[in-house]
Image (cartoon, coloured by chain):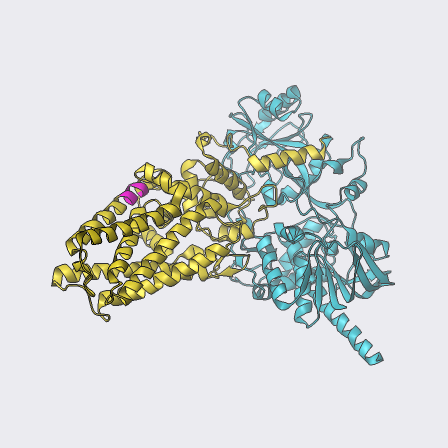
Chain colours: A cyan, B yellow
Amino acid sequence: MVDVLVIGGGNAALCAALMAREAGASVLLLEAAPREWRGGNSQHVRNLRCMHDAPQDVLIDAYPEEEYWQDLLKVTGGQTNEKLARLVIRASSNCRDWMRSHGVHFQPPLSGALHVARTNAFFMGGGKALINAYYRSAARLGVQIRYDAPVDGIELDGDTFVAARVGRERFEARSCVLAAGGFESDRAWLREAWGQVDGEWPADNFLIRGTRFNMGVPLKRLIDAGADTLGDPSQSHCVAIDARAPLYDGGICTRIDCVSLGVVVNRDGLRFYDEGEDFWPKRYAIWGRLVALQPGQIGYSIIDAKAVGRFMPPVFPGERADTLAELARKIGVEETQFVRTVEAYNAACRVGTFDHAVLDDCHTEGIDPPKTHWAQPIDRPPYYGYALRPGITFTYLSLKVDEHAAVHFGGKPSPNVFAAGEMMSGNVLGKGYTAGVGIAIGTAFGRIAGAQAAQAARALTGAYHGAA
Amino acid sequence: MEPLEALTREAAALGANSPVVGLPSGLSSGLSSLSGSEAEVARVMQICNACRYCEGYCAVFPAMTHRLEFGKNDVHFLANLCHNCGACLHACQYAPPHEFAVNVPQAMAAVRVHTYSDYAWPAALGALYKRNGLTLALASAFGLALFLVLTMLAVGTLPVSGNFYAIFPHRMLVLMFGVTFVYALVALGIGVRRFWRDQAPGAVSGTALGEATHDALTLRYLGGGHGQGCNESDDAYTLLRRRFHHLTFYGFLLCFAATCVATLYHYAFGWQAPYDYTSLPVLLGTVGGLGLLAGPIGLLGLNLNRHPLHGDANQKPMDRGFIALLLLVSASGLLLLAARDTAAMSVLLAIHLGVVMALFLTLPYGKFAHGIYRCAALLKWTVEKRNPPKLQLGNE
């Protein structure tokens, strides 16, 4: 029997495994995916939001605890736990040396991400490089790693972990860390959570930006066993991405960054939201849900030649046409209404001094919804259209934990079941998102869960010895 | 409602063969003229340009961000800027088995073979080498060695201990190797001039030249961006390739310096070979020869154990042909030195000279060309980055 069983194979799981091993525990890590798909959504991450009071290697200026907390409070609309949030924030200020000691490399922000130069430390090579470093370190330290090991059963004695099952195999351990992600890869569960709207099942048209292995089985087993949860299963981090993105693992490159430079219409050729409400990095996360609420769960970002070269290049080329009517036919939007919508928008534009770097004075008058910034007529061919679909990054439904990462049953912490990463991120991030906070939560709670699990296993071993 | 299977199929099709024409740019693309391997680089770069996670590893990715589309000249520039370190492959969230099947080092390597042959002068020799690198290198080495041995027999010269010129008169050697060396220089010069002129980056400043020289001589981009090295058989970093390459390159330079010093001795001072074991030419040649022995052996070992997804399998015969020639040069040279006072000297001399001549003859078309085109690409980059094109991509 090992001391600590870690269920999951992403950032939080690896942080837990490394900490438990460093504390002297024997550790077995069960990753559901095969080796080449290991790491879950952590394969796709790119940075860590870090508190710092002064410039620090790749981080400029300062990002004090209070500002970080206020940012978190704002994006979650108050759906957070201040004690746990501040714990994550403080941990983000001093975890990087530990990360480096396990082979993680940091770099200044990437081109196109300078707006987070002050707040976020980027992983050189991104999340997969981070994961690779942790796996190498784990192997070196003697953590046992099993791939292709999706846990389908968890045995508990009340609130106490006994064993996990993978098919016919049974793995007993003195304590357990659950870090197996949300349930966004389970289409049936998503369908159930979103329900039926106007005769459609919206979730059937969602794309999953991350791993195909987050089936939510350990989460479901814990919920069935009576673990306390928080969050609404229909809540997820959901952004508008290129409709041609692969069903899973499209990651960062499927984003479409030209929304604020043009208009967005639905299948019927109608606009449905202010495309220029705020800077795109502050708005991209609401567009997934906006598109999810449109008929057929599809939208079309429309730009003209003026926008070319002003946004991050998309992974797939857009549909291109020399007239609006031709573009409507190419993208499959109702032609007459589309042309009417764009012409009405063009006529409503009050163009002042266009400046995409500030909230400029180019806006519309007399149309609904308005476009409040960067409103320029779409009148210079060629025109381009990009189809948008909702892309789910992760789900918010979480196990309730305390500052020791202990999973709660009936309001009481379990003695040996701990959770980290997306399985508990809803404790800190009840809704909303801000860049690099998922990794901050996963790293902080992964490390806590690992240390606590090692301690719990040690306490149990001591008890056994005492009894003998 | 669009069935998910249809979306998946479409994504897989786009991933496998993403159309590279009709990109969102007002510029005329000129991409339709891309060959298969060039189109693959253009496809991969389109995906990388939308991701950019690898920007910290090397110069390829920052250079990529200066572009919205990738024409023939961009592709050859980026391909030769790539040092095939492998870091971006192991870090790639879109690497196989992902349907996007992004493999930057492999795509770049496949194009580089074409750079060496397409820009080669004369073109026919480039094409020949591309197909038969190893065979050509070895065949010419042994062919030339045999020719020299036969010449020796026909002329009926007797081996005289330590006296090379009794077998091949000094003037004959100078003529043969002088012509071969100048030929190699001219052929490479014409090739690299064509490469530079396709999308010249502008005037070369002293600082740009200095930076490119530094990056080339230190093999900066085999450091992995963090200085811990590049990837070989797995995702761990190692400095072995940089070190073995340094041994090879600086060993080669020392051997070259030995020849230059000996030439100077001969013409300026009238001092005739053979020189003493402790003389400058022999010391330089011995140290260089040892480097040129250890370096290529190490590189060959790494080459044989490289991760199967690294590089282009079609290029391996060319890589190994070059490594084999370098090894033959150093091994035969050191043997000749050791046995220069024995009866084996004349045959060893013929072999050594044949191998060296084959090396020079194949320099412009084979793996050696990587150094020339890589340096040109590094210089293009250090010039270009000081004068970046104006793109306003904004945030996120």
In the drawing, does residue B25 fall left or right of residue A172?
Answer: left
> Could you tell me residue B307's position as x and y percent?
53, 53
Look at the image and tell me in which quarter the N terminus of chain B lies.
top right
Using the rendered view, name the quadrant where residue A253 is placed: top right
Front residue of this view, candidates B306 and B217: B306
Quarter of the C terminus of chain B within the rendering: top right
Magenta region includes residue A292: no
Q: Position of residue B201 (x, y in %)?
A: 35, 42
Q: Is residue B190 magenta?
A: yes
Could you tell me what secondary structure mostly forms the magenta stretch? helix
Near-viewer residue (A80 or B82) = B82
User: Can residue B375 be seen in this snapshot?
Assistant: no
Could you tell me how many numbered marks the image carries?
Answer: 0
Q: Is A431 positioned to the left or the right of B326 in the image? A: right
Q: Is residue B177 above or below residue A64?
A: above
Q: In the orientation shown, which residue stands out farthest toward the top?
A: A336
Magenta-tinted stretch:
B187-192
Residue A20 seen in this snapshot: yes
Residue A432 position (above or below residue A94): above
Residue toward you, A373 or A85: A85
Q: Percent from the top left, x then y, of residue A212?
A: 69, 46
* Whole-percent x, y for residue B15 in the image: 58, 38
